[in-house]
Image (cartoon, rainbow, N blue to C red):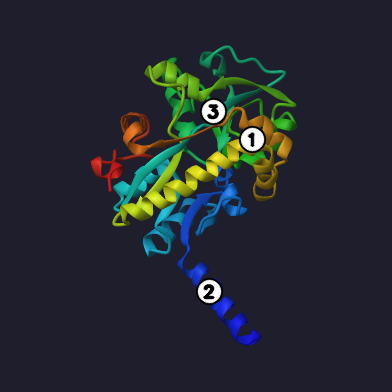
């Protein structure tokens, strides 16, 4: 009898694992809102699968292994225009990018960067890279000529900054906070964007996406799970960041300081569509090599 019960329970557990809804989520700041799901703090049958580079997420979406993914807005827009049938459900990460300056360096506006080097993560075409280039050009500076833009992994930039080898860095949180023992926050990219564009002081950085053809009931279910997870996060912030520490490899104290400068708010697509469209249009104008096409209306509807 006990053997039969054990077999039945094992089968049920396997079925739950197979049929659980998979949500792809990047390793980085956008992981924090789903930590309550990962750590079973909110009831759901959602399995969070962490991806470390966009190719992982693309492969799982294309194969049909997962129907839902948290993606950078710019990455998702490029996937859509390349024929991958996804659509935006909501934006929930709005604030994360800052310019950090060493204590022995001076920043007095963009023009003061002439003749300097600025480090930023990964490679050309990332959101903060495109924004920085835009702001430099507005001030009459030529990126790569007047201001040298260099790229490295964010962890490496932090190490170089702390050793004094980097004086200026455009970084997302929590890496900006990790530099503050040796520098200061000189500029908030979200505020700069809002001021220049006459828009709210925020950027549509990352959001929830769904593969085309998934039923509305399923989409609503995932939305509710994500919203519940974010609600738990805000109500239990210290506990959430303690749990996030082991996933991100960043201390809870740093995450607590950084969280003050992160902007998480669940905004459904119908309430932010124009804001996202404006952002993507501007990205296309500023860096057509990185965003050759602007998504059509299908990007915003299922």
Where residue 268 sits: x, y (%)? 38, 38
Q: Residues within 10 Å of mark 3 (few under 14, many from 20)?
A: some
Are the residues tagged 2 and 1 within 8 Å (C-beta)? no
Find numbered disc 1 in the image and state the secondary structure of the residue it sits on: helix
Q: Nearer the viewer, residue 240 or 191?
A: 240
Q: Which mark is residue 12?
A: 2
Q: Is residue 89 above or below residue 211?
A: above
Q: Relative to residue 160, is residue 59 drawn left or right?
A: left
Q: Residue at x 43, y 61 (%)?
A: 60
Q: Quadrant of residue 176?
A: top right
Q: Residues within 10 Å of mark 1 (few under 14, many from 20)?
A: many
Query: Who comes first in sequence, dot 1 or dot 3?
Result: 3
Where residue 111 sits: x, y (%)? 52, 14
Q: Residue at x 56, y 20 (%)?
A: 187
Can I make out residue 100 in this image? yes
Q: Circle 3 sits on which residue?
A: 148
Q: Circle 1 sits on which residue?
A: 175
Where residue 151 sits: x, y (%)? 56, 38
Can I make out residue 125 in this image? no
Are the residues tagged 1 and 3 within 8 Å (C-beta)? no
Q: Residue at x 42, y 45 (%)?
A: 208
Q: Relative to residue 39, is residue 271 drawn left or right?
A: left
Q: Residue at x 60, y 42 (%)?
A: 153
Inter-mark Cα distance, 2 to 3: 57 Å
Where residue 233 sits: x, y (%)? 59, 40
Q: Residue furthest top?
A: 108
Q: Quadrant of residue 258?
A: top right
Inter-mark Cα distance, 2 to 1: 42 Å
Tag in front: 2 or 1: 2
């Amino acid at each position: 009898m006990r053997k039969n019960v054990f077999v039945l329970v094992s089968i049920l557990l396997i079925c739950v694992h197979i049929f659980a809804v998979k949500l792809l989520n990047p390793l980085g700041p956008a992981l924090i809102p789903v930590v309550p799901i990962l750590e079973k703090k909110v009831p759901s049958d959602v399995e969070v699968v962490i991806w470390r580079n966009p190719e992982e997420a693309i492969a799982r979406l294309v194969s049909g292994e997962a129907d839902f993914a948290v993606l950078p807005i710019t990455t998702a827009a490029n996937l859509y225009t390349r024929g991958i049938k996804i659509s935006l459900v909501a934006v929930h990460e709005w604030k994360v990018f800052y310019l950090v300056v060493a204590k022995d360096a001076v920043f007095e506006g963009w023009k003061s960067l002439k003749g300097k080097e600025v480090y930023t993560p990964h490679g050309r075409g990332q959101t903060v890279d495109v924004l920085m280039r835009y702001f430099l050009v507005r001030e009459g500076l030529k990126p790569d000529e007047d201001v040298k833009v260099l790229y490295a992994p964010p962890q490496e930039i932090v190490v170089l900054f702390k050793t004094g080898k980097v004086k200026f860095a455009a970084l997302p949180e929590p890496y900006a906070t990790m530099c503050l023992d040796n520098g200061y926050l000189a500029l908030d990219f979200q505020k700069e964007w809002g001021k220049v564009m006459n828009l709210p002081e925020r950027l549509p950085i990352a959001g929830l996406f769904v593969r085309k053809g998934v039923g509305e009931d399923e989409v609503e279910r995932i939305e509710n799970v994500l919203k519940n997870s974010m609600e738990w996060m805000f109500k239990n912030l210290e506990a959430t960041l303690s749990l996030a520490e082991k996933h991100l490899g960043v201390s809870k104290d740093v995450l607590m300081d950084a969280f003050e400068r992160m902007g998480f708010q669940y905004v459904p697509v119908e309430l932010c569509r124009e804001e996202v469209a404006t952002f993507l249009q501007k990205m296309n104008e500023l860096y057509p090599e990185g965003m050759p096409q602007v998504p059509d209306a299908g990007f915003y509807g299922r």
